[in-house]
Amino acid sequence: MTTLILVALVVILLLLRQSILLVLAVGTAYTHLFLSNSKIVFMMQDVWAAIDKEILLAVPMFILAGAVMTRGSIAARLIRLVSALTAPIPGGLGVAAILSCTVFAAISGSSIVTMLAISTIMYPALLAAGYDRRFSIGMLCAGGTLGIIIPPSIPMILYGIMTEVSITRLFLAGILPGLLLASMLSAYAIGMNYNRERSRWNVHEILASAKEGLLALFLPVLLLGGIYSGHFTPTESAAIALIYALLVESLVYRELSLRDFHAIVAETAALLGMLLPLLALATSLNVIMDYERVPQALVALMQGFIDSRFTFLLASNILLIVAGCFMEVGSAIVILGPLLAPIAASYGVDPVHFGIIMTVNLEIGYITPPVGLNLFVAMVAFKESFGAICRAVVPFILIMLAGLVVICAFPGLSLWLGG
């Protein structure tokens, strides 16, 4: 019977073309049955326990909220306000693109949602204003990565679940590193466009855009203020974000129809159909590995040939960037997080700080050739070849790597708020 179940599982995953799920499912079942002398029923119990968590409700609700705001006009209103405020700055429209990604990241929790929402509006505007095409593509790709660094962040939620680290602390810890990366990208935008003709502040435009975007601008204040003041949990904040976005888009701005919402729900369900089984299987594998003391064995093994905190961070950063090139961020976190976090702790790296390091690494990997997944999304969004996208992101990858070095070297940047 057990063999029949395993064969059926393999066939289903092959038909669905879910290679990562297939490898994880077979690996988990093999570990339970042959390496640990466990039973398939224990694996199923672990799977159920993994998805029977209230905090998981935050993931689909944040994804839905971000998709609603992308399909509606909240993103467009935020961009109009930020563009009006940055008009006198050299390269003001480029800075506006980065700041728009930063603000929208504080709502959506997803890098792809952030990039698509902002790029749809900002990319044509940048080209029309005479900005270099390669610079514009690279900047929007890099700005989109802020979607998982600026809290609330779906990968941080997954890391917190898998490593049992406080998600509120992770959210707090992501604020300053996220603002650091946004500042570095903005500084590059100013430097590259310093001699570009700039506009004066248009008070009428600022007031008009502020009036139009007030409800949109209030959402990140509501979410982050509520979480950090302790008035509601990350799960409750996700529900509030979704309800608020639906009410504003459908009743106030009237930009979202029932048909639009139906399509958004279907897209989110398809995404969760991949994420939740992955999370459940990874949890089951982690349970049996913990029972067999695999993390402790890895710690001992690593300490045998890595003799310093610096060497560990260097090795783990390289591993995580490579993993980000080949794996979806959520998949990498649920698989690698529970393995690397205990090793990091053995070298004196705070688990919250390591969560931020891991998130930044994987997101850099997401826009790193040859197979960074955001690059393929950008091909569709910008209608450019893969080679053109890769050339465009190179300087921004270097900027983000410099930011990663600062984040690794100064733990206080993460722990000042998240400690």
Image: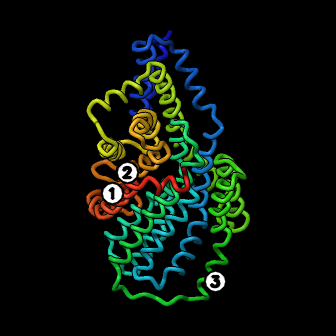
User: Is label 3 or label 1 in front?
Assistant: 1
Label 1, secondary structure: give it. Answer: helix
> Of the residues shown, which amino acid type is indicated by label 1?
Leu
Q: Residue at x 46, y 48 (%)?
A: 353
What is the C-alpha distance between the residues marked 2 and 1? 13 Å
Q: Residue at x 65, y 46 (%)?
A: 235
Q: Are marks 3 and 1 in contact (CB under 8 Å)?
A: no
Percent of width and height locating residue 309? 34, 43
Classify 195 as above or below 270.
below
Q: Residue at x 52, y 58 (%)?
A: 175
- Which label belongs to residue 413? none
Mark with earlier residue (3, 1): 3
Relative to 11, 315 lies left or right: left
Relative to 37, 221 lies left or right: right
- Which label belongs to residue 366? 2
> Of the residues shown, which amino acid type is indicated by label 3?
Leu
Mark with earlier residue (2, 3): 3
What is the C-alpha distance between the residues marked 2 and 3? 38 Å
Mark with earlier residue (2, 1): 2
Q: Is residue 10 visible?
A: no
- Which label belongs to residue 401? 1
Label 3, secondary structure: give it. Answer: helix
What is the C-alpha distance between the residues marked 3 and 1? 38 Å
Label 1 crowd bin: few (<14), some (14–19), many (20+), radius 10 Å: some
- State the image quarter where residue 294 is shown: top left
Relative to 240, 24 lies left or right: left
Pointer 3 residue? 207
User: Is label 2 or label 1 in front?
Assistant: 1
Q: Are marks 2 and 1 in contact (CB under 8 Å)?
A: no
Classify 139 as above or below 246.
below
